[in-house]
Amino acid sequence: MSDELIRRVLKVMATSKRIPLETVTIDSEFQQLGIDSMDAVEILFALENEFDISIPDDEVRSVRNVRQMCEGVEKLVAAKSADAAAGQ
C-alpha cells in the first residue's frame, strides 16, 4: 500500500470528521476516533470523490479501522486502474 494512498485516506477522514490530521493513523480504530455510522457514510462519499471510485455499501459495514479502509480503497483503485488499462 503506497504512502500516498494512506496519506490521502487519512486526510479525507480527518477533514470529514473535523479532527486534527495527526490524531488519525493507519492503526486508528473508528471507535477511538469517535466515528459512528453517520460519520462513516460521510467519509465514504468523500473517499469516493477523492479517488473517483464506487465503494459497495456491503463492504463498508465490516470496516472498523483505518487500515481496513485503506486496504479497501487500494483494492478498488487497483481494480479501476486494471479496468482502465484493459479498456485502452
Image (cartoon, rainbow, N blue to C red):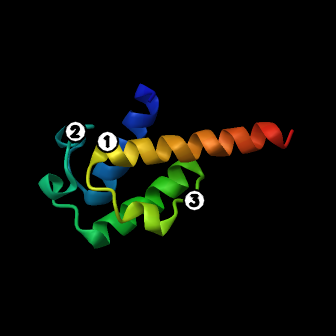
Q: Tell me if mark 3 has few (under 14), some (14-19) or many (20+) residues whose alpha carbon lies within 10 angstroms of its own.
A: some
Q: Is residue 11 visible?
A: no
Find residue 74 and report its horizontal and vertical position in percent: 49, 40
Find residue 36 and report its horizontal and vertical position in percent: 23, 67
| Circle 2 SS class | loop
| Circle 1 SS class | helix
Find residue 26 and report its horizontal and vertical position in percent: 27, 37
Q: Which residue is mark 3?
A: 54
**Residue at horizontal 60%, vertical 52%?**
52
Would you say the residues marked 3 and 2 are in contact, meaning their CB atoms lie under 8 Å apart? no
- What's the CA distance linking mark 2 and mark 1? 6 Å
**Whether residue 36 is situated above or below residue 65 in the rendered picture:** below
Mark 3 belongs to which amino acid?
Ser
Find residue 49 and report its horizontal and vertical position in percent: 54, 56
**Residue at horizontal 46%, vertical 54%?**
47
Would you say the residues marked 2 and 1 are in contact, meaning their CB atoms lie under 8 Å apart? yes
Mark 2 belongs to which amino acid?
Asp
| Circle 3 SS class | loop
Among the two numbered marks 2 and 1 on one chain, the one whose residue lies closer to the N terminus: 2
Q: Is residue 74 left or right of residue 22?
A: right
Q: Which residue is mark 1?
A: 67
Q: Is residue 82 left or right of residue 63?
A: right
Q: Which residue is mark 2?
A: 27
**Residue at horizontal 22%, vertical 42%?**
24
Among the two numbered marks 1 and 3 on one chain, the one whose residue lies closer to the N terminus: 3
Circle number at residue 78: none
- What's the CA distance linking mark 3 and mark 2? 24 Å
Q: Tell me if mark 2 has few (under 14), some (14-19) or many (20+) residues whose alpha carbon lies within 10 angstroms of its own.
A: few
Mark 1 belongs to which amino acid?
Arg
**Whether residue 41 is situated above or below residue 27 in the rendered picture:** below
Position of the N terminus by quadrant: top left
